[in-house]
Image (cartoon, grey):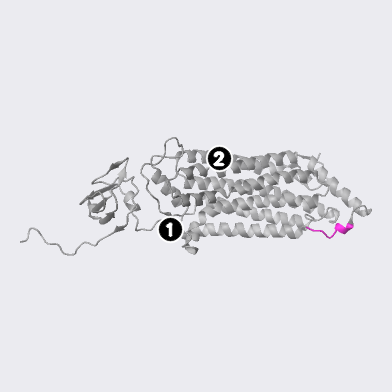
Amino acid sequence: MAANVLVRNLNAIQETQQQASVSTVDHALDGQSRFGEIVAILAVGSVLSTAAVSLRVYTRVRMLRTFGLDDSVMVVAQMFLIGSAVAIGLESKWGLGFHSWVPPPEDYVPYMKSFYTSIIVYNIATCLVKISILLQYRRIFAIDIMQKLTLWGLTFMISWTAMLSFLLPMMCLPVAAFWDPTIEGRCIDFLAIWYTMAGVNLVADFAIFSMPIPVINSLQLPRKQKRMLLVVFCLGFFTCIISALRIRTLRVAADTKDPYWDNVDAATWSFLEVAIGILAACLPTLRPIFVTLLPRLFNASSLQFRSSGRPSKYGNPYAQPSEGNNRASFMHGLGFHRPMSSTEGLNRQDGVEMSGQESETSAEYTVSVSTGAPESLDKMSRVKSKRDSVMDGQHIRGHIRTTTVVTQEVTFEKPSSSKSNPDQD
């Protein structure tokens, strides 16, 4: 016994073809076609997503030299998206986008084979995009709560993907009963499983794309920079909108009297859902390219971190005592790099000692940076400070804590080649 949706679609196609043979349909509509619409959507989505993934790979491999697991999963997801585009394109070859009485009856079987393939590759591609985004979050966000949330999300998404990979190919038993109406078989209730998968995708998309928002809000960043990050990460909510629109098309596809024509919306919205998800996931990784192409718009000097004293962490589960390190890890994961003239390197040393004339306003200090080894104490620099470093509301004299974020410029002086020996008079 075939599923209700397949039976209704097959009956609708056969009915319209019978009506066409007895001239009970409007043959003035025979020339109508949505083929151009399908090809345009598939072409634009495939080109944009392929370009985004290619630029991501180039950025991670050639510019940052840190190609990770999230990048690998995204490449595989893009391959499945291309497979989905090919399957939908084959559907349009065998009748999708035309009125159901136009294609000959012998095109039904190849059309259903293409439809069967598109269902499988679409759902796997959707899951892989979500897995890649969660892996990307684990790489970018070092705070404990994000590590736990992403771990739970990965556990669910990997289990969900494994279940769909096993269930969807077995939609009908025998499998050929899906596309061959002459074969007796049993199929699952497609409308129920479609609604279930669409609902899970919508909830998962909303949850995943909401994760970074509290973390970004808790960072001590300039307001303009924080807004830019929020806009980039919130692009994924377009995927949620498409997922919601796609759910409406499923009912239309199930109840239609003209399946070849009305199924176009369900097919194209499904494709766009994955394509836009890939674009939203890749854009945050492309900042190094944007800096190279548009240096004025993405000026690295305007993206330096600022110290604002004590981090605001009270009542905020996303803040950590070492917020400066978390912020640096987060921005480094996005490709934010500061010039070597900044004193970021001082914060990464085991100890930083300061001596020299101190002043309440402007002073000149000699800073010695040690890494724990006595022989490293010969690394000297001159730091011009506009104000004393402040930690917990108190002036720190004679010592710079390694957790303090310093934004002064550093110039290194080459020691004089000859020194007077005090023993020789």
Whether 127 is among the magenta residues is no
Q: Nearer the viewer, residue 305 or 193?
A: 305
Q: Which residue is mark 2?
A: 153
Q: Amino acid at mark 2?
A: Gly
Q: Outermost residue, top direction?
A: 315
The answer to whether one can see residue 410 in this image is yes
In-front residue for pair 364/326: 364
In the image: residue 36, left or right of residue 322:
right
Label 1 to label 2, Cα distance in Å? Answer: 33 Å
Give the position of the C terminus as an image quadrant: bottom left
Q: Is residue 54 above or below residue 135?
A: below
Q: Residue at x 27, y 44 (%)?
A: 396
Which residue is located at x 50 percent, y 64 percent? Answer: 293
Q: What's drawn in magenta, residue-wise?
A: 27-33
State the image coordinates of residue 241 (x, y, percent, origin top left).
Answer: 64, 46
Which mark, by number, is residue 375?
A: none
Amino acid residing under circle 1? Ala
Residue located 44% across and 59% down the image: 299
Q: Residue drawn at (51%, 57%), measured in percent from left and top? A: 286
Residue 177, image x, y percentages = 79, 44
| Label drawn at residue 300 | 1
Direction from residue 297 to residue 129 in the image, left or right: right
Along the line of sight, which residue is nearer the eye, 234 or 371?
234
Q: For the residue labelled by badge 1, is the local secondary structure a helix, a strand or a loop?
A: helix
Q: Secondary structure beneath disc 2?
A: helix
Residue 153: quarter of image: top right
Q: Residues within 10 Å of mark 1 (few under 14, many from 20)?
A: some
Say above or below: 298 vs 254: below
Answer yes or no: do the residues labelled 1 and 2 have beta carbons within 8 Å?
A: no
Q: Nearer the viewer, residue 102 or 233?
A: 233
Instruction: Classify the position of the N terminus by image quarter.
Output: top right
Residue 85 position within the rendered picture, expressed as x and y whole percent measured from the top left: 68, 55
